[in-house]
């Protein structure tokens, strides 16, 4: 998922975030005091930008709340990042195109009504419908019949996708347009949550007072102040809450949240502010958290411009990549809050393979100069890196440019745009020259997400205009693989092609730099940068 | 007097229209596409974007958008934000918070700033005067966010006297620290303005007359000196009240207060037209009313001023 927007520090500044998630926790609990399962804890959040509807939550503020209120067919294990069945008992397929879903019985919504196959199918049909204005509606694009409820122009011709068939209360099938072997991974995204019947009578009202089937149920939304949830007693998921609920406290700056954390007025943070990065481990001791995140920072090239199209310009791009001293920049300018990238897929993601970028992502001034010369030099001997000035990127863009300038003599400079939306408009409108900051935050912890969605020809988020028949062929093959494992391996092969063409320079992986108060313990973070909500223990 | 007030109130009507139009144009000309920005880095689905644009009336030409907006205003509908909340509700939430904070700050400006200026002005060249000058110089030269963070670190994190941020904006005691920080700069100006004004009026003829008449000292200072010296200070305080309402973004950010400044800042970032226009229009009206009150106060303070 795209990285986001204003509120958060950096890159990824925020948009999406999905599910509860994945992999790689760290942090850990400090000591094992007794805990009280009825007590709630507070979490640093930001005011949701959209109503609290599952398919409408693609920024962190709303996304984190919605993923606690709703639970889909599956989610991702916070420690391993692997797909884990929740409402679904099984999701089977023989051809990677038709999926048979069997539900567990006993699940209910917070209003007491049962969660059935119909709850899912109705919710997806509603969310995919273009007229219902759900931001994540395109997530349903794989399902057959999507184009009828979501035509490119005009009104939907029907309100049901033909690919969804309900057999009975606990069985339904999903038929896709094409083979997508990792489709179950997508089903872990919060947009695929079920909705209770009442929702469809008053979607706007339910957007303000959501009724879900997740571990926590909605209590109140005091706008710009807090969203209060409490544990749902009849929650049937495998991750039963060990606390009494989560209170999402809205902060406009992470500095204010950090001040509250230090004085125990806030229990768990999202990210410590950049100003505290140097000291937070001293300030918090063993309550500081430093965990990997499924997000990567890149610098993309405008491959759609004629000067970058000749085949040998790939050498120039590889040379520029080798001219960047990643290790020094992550340690100094970024204060250890990032880890140098060695591939286009972030660490901890299923299918992650270290070192795919190889020597091209290793700092080597001599080789860098040589490659750039062989490739015919940088057009005009000058490059500009476009970035959004509101995301805290200036420092590292300047550092990257310094590194490039010193090594290669190429005149590199930053080209700041006022804010995130202006920069996005310039990037998608092809109104920039040369290079631009880009990033990717996982939608689901599988390497396909980092590759197919960004580098495949014509992919929605392919901002570089990269088009490689070889890459497309390998990823299509991977999509048709028989198992997730084969898919991941197939995409690893496709990723190797990126090293040859270098459509974007991988810079570094994000990390969760966070902490928690003395009131809580057993706080671990997954690769989405979310705490394992239900596992947090509040001291008695 | 009544006519004067009526005329001033009537003048607010064209100002209201002008202000809404100008702000509307300004929001419209902000760079970037608010609908596309909702999708983050992920490419926006064109069909969905078109549908959302239609929903928020953004697919119409600008003049139609404005007429649509104004038409709604006359039906007391300020539009809805992207979260689906009515803007009137957002304003009803944010303004009381900011008004409370502004009043706390205003209180400090008057009840700390004025006496400081009075003492400094009466005893020019004394130790007290020098002290006030040095202190206000320091406050004026330090940016408010530095003051804010220092105050927060010392009083909340180190000493633990107050909570680091405002947990409940209805609890006035929690607003004291942010209020003081917010007031600091204006407080320094008020003190210095009062000091200068008092210094000048001390040498005025009517002061000599008052002393010669043998009036008691408190009458001379209270009724003659202070009252005449207050005119420039009141002018400043009047416009400052407007500034306190809309300009508290930094302080509100440091102490996490969900007031007008923060809501406005976020709305501008999201290019959320209805919210921005609604809030700024109300702020413009606040300014207008504040300056009307200031003008009326002149007449109270200075008997030579009369409004026909």
Image (spheres, coloured by chain):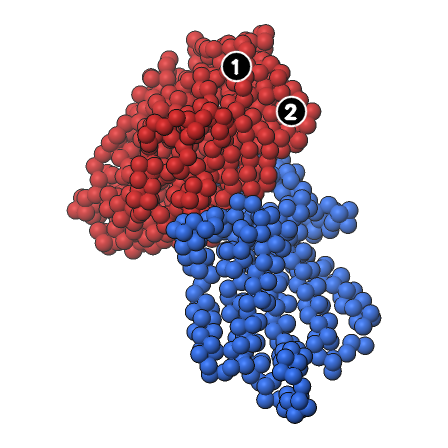
Q: Chain of mark 2?
A: A
Q: Which chain is blue?
A: B
Q: Nearer the viewer, residue A14 or A488?
A: A14
Image height of A153 relative to A490, above or below = below
The answer to whether residue A222 is left or right of residue A512 is right
Q: Position of residue A267 (x, y in %)?
A: 43, 37
Q: Residue at x 60, y 33 (%)?
A: A220
Vertical placement of B164 versus A286: above or below? below
Q: Residue at x 62, y 20 (%)?
A: A111
Nearest-to-viewer mark from 2 and 1:
2
Chain depicted in red: A
In 3D space, how far apart are the residues under numbered discs 2 and 1 (Cα atoms)? 22 Å
Q: Around disc 2, counting alpha carbons within 10 Å, would you say few (fewer than 14), some (14 to 19), or many (20 or more)?
A: some
Residues at marks 2 and 1 on the same chain = yes
Q: Residue furthest left?
A: A366
Kindly identify which residue carries mark 2: A199
Q: Residue at x 68, y 65 (%)?
A: B290
Q: Nearer the viewer, residue B286 or A233?
A: A233
In the displayed structure image, the side of residue A88 where residue A440 appears, left or right = left
> What residue is shown with label 1?
A174
Q: Earlier in the sequence, mark 2 or mark 1?
A: 1
Q: Residue at x 52, y 60 (%)?
A: B180
**As drawn, is A33 to the left or to the right of B267?**
left
Q: Is residue A411 visible?
A: yes
**Residue A143 appears in view:** no
Question: In the image, residue B200 lies at what x, y percent?
Answer: 58, 85
Chain letter of the residue carrying label 1: A
Which type of secondary structure does the marked residue at label 1 adopt?
A: strand
**Picture coordinates of residue A295 (x, y %)?**
37, 35
């Amino acid at each position: 998922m795209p990285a986001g927007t204003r509120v958060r520090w950096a890159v990824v500044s925020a948009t999406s975030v999905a599910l509860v998630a994945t992999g790689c926790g760290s942090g850990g609990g400090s000591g094992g005091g007794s805990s009280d399962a009825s007590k709630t804890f507070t979490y640093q959040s930001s005011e949701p930008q959209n109503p609290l509807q599952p398919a409408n939550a693609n920024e962190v503020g709303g996304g984190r709340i919605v993923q606690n209120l709703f639970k889909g067919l599956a989610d991702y294990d916070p420690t391993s990042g692997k797909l884990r069945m929740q409402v679904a008992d099984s999701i089977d397929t023989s051809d990677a195109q038709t999926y048979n879903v069997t539900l567990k019985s006993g699940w209910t919504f917070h209003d007491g009504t049962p969660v059935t196959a119909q709850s899912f199918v109705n919710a997806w049909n509603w969310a995919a419908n273009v007229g219902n204005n759900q931001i994540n509606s395109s997530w349903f694009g794989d399902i057959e019949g999507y184009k009828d409820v979501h035509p490119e122009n005009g009104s939907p011709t029907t309100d049901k996708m033909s690919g969804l068939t309900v057999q009975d209360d606990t069985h339904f099938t999903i038929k896709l347009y094409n083979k997508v072997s990792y489709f179950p991974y997508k089903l872990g995204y919060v947009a695929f949550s079920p909705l209770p019947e009442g929702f469809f009578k008053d979607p706007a009202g339910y957007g303000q007072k959501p009724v879900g089937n997740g571990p926590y149920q909605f209590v109140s939304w005091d706008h710009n102040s807090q969203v209060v949830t409490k544990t749902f007693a009849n929650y049937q998921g495998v991750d039963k809450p060990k606390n009494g609920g989560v209170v999402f406290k809205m902060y406009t700056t992470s500095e204010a949240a950090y001040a509250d954390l230090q004085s125990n007025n806030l229990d768990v943070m999202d990210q410590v502010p950049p100003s505290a990065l140097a000291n937070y481990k001293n300030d918090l001791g063993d309550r500081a958290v430093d965990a990997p995140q499924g997000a990567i920072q890149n610098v993309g090239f405008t491959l759609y411009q004629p000067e970058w199209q000749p085949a040998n310009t790939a050498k120039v791009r590889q040379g520029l990549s080798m001219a960047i001293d990643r290790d020094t920049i992550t340690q100094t300018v970024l204060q250890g809050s990032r880890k140098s990238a060695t591939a286009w897929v972030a660490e901890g993601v299923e299918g992650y393979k270290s070192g795919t970028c190889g020597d091209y992502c290793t700092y080597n001034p001599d080789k860098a100069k040589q490659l750039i010369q062989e490739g015919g030099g940088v057009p005009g001997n000058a490059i500009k890196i476009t970035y959004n000035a509101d995301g805290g990127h200036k420092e590292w863009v300047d550092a990257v440019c310094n590194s490039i300038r010193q090594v290669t003599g190429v005149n590199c400079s930053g080209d700041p745009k006022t804010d995130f939306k202006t920069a996005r408009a310039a990037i998608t409108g092809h109104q920039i020259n040369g290079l631009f900051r880009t990033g990717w935050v996982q939608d689901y912890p599988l390497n396909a997400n980092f590759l197919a969605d960004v580098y495949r020809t014509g992919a929605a988020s392919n901002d570089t205009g990269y088009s490689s028949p070889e890459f497309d062929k390998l990823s299509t093959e991977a999509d048709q693989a028989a198992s997730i494992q084969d898919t991941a391996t197939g995409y690893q092969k496709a990723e190797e092609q990126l090293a040859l063409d270098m459509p974007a320079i991988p810079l570094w992986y994000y990390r969760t730099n966070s902490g928690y108060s003395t009131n809580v313990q057993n706080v671990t973070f997954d690769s989405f940068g979310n705490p394992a909500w239900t596992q947090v223990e509040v001291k008695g | 007097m009544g006519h004067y007030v009526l005329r001033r109130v009537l003048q607010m009507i064209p100002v209201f229209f002008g202000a809404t139009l100008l702000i509307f144009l300004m929001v419209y000309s902000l760079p970037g596409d608010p609908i596309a920005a909702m999708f983050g880095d992920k490419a926006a689905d064109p069909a969905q974007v078109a549908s959302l644009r239609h929903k928020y009336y953004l697919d119409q030409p600008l003049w139609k958008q404005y007429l649509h907006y104004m038409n709604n205003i006359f039906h007391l509908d300020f539009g809805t934000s992207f979260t689906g909340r009515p803007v009137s509700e957002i304003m009803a939430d944010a303004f009381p918070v900011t008004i409370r904070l502004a009043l706390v700050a205003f209180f400090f400006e008057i009840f700390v700033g004025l006496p400081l200026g009075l003492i400094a002005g009466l005893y020019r060249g004394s130790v007290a005067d020098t002290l006030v000058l040095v202190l206000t110089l320091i406050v004026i030269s330090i940016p408010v966010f530095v003051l804010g963070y220092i105050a927060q670190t010392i009083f909340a994190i180190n000493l633990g006297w107050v909570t680091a941020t405002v947990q409940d904006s209805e609890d006035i005691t929690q607003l004291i620290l942010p209020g003081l920080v917010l007031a600091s700069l204006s407080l320094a100006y008020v003190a210095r303005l009062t000091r200068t004004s008092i210094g000048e009026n001390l040498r005025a003829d009517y002061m000599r007359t008052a002393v010669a008449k043998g009036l008691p000292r408190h009458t001379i200072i209270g009724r003659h000196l202070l009252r005449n010296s207050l005119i420039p200070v009141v002018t400043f305080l009047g416009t400052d009240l407007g500034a306190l309402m809309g300009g508290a973004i930094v302080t509100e950010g440091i102490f996490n207060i969900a007031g007008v400044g923060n809501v406005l800042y976020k709305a501008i970032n999201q290019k959320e037209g209805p919210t921005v226009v609604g809030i700024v229009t109300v702020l413009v009206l606040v300014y207008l009313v504040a300056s009307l009150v200031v003008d009326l106060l002149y007449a109270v303070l200075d008997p030579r001023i009369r409004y026909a």
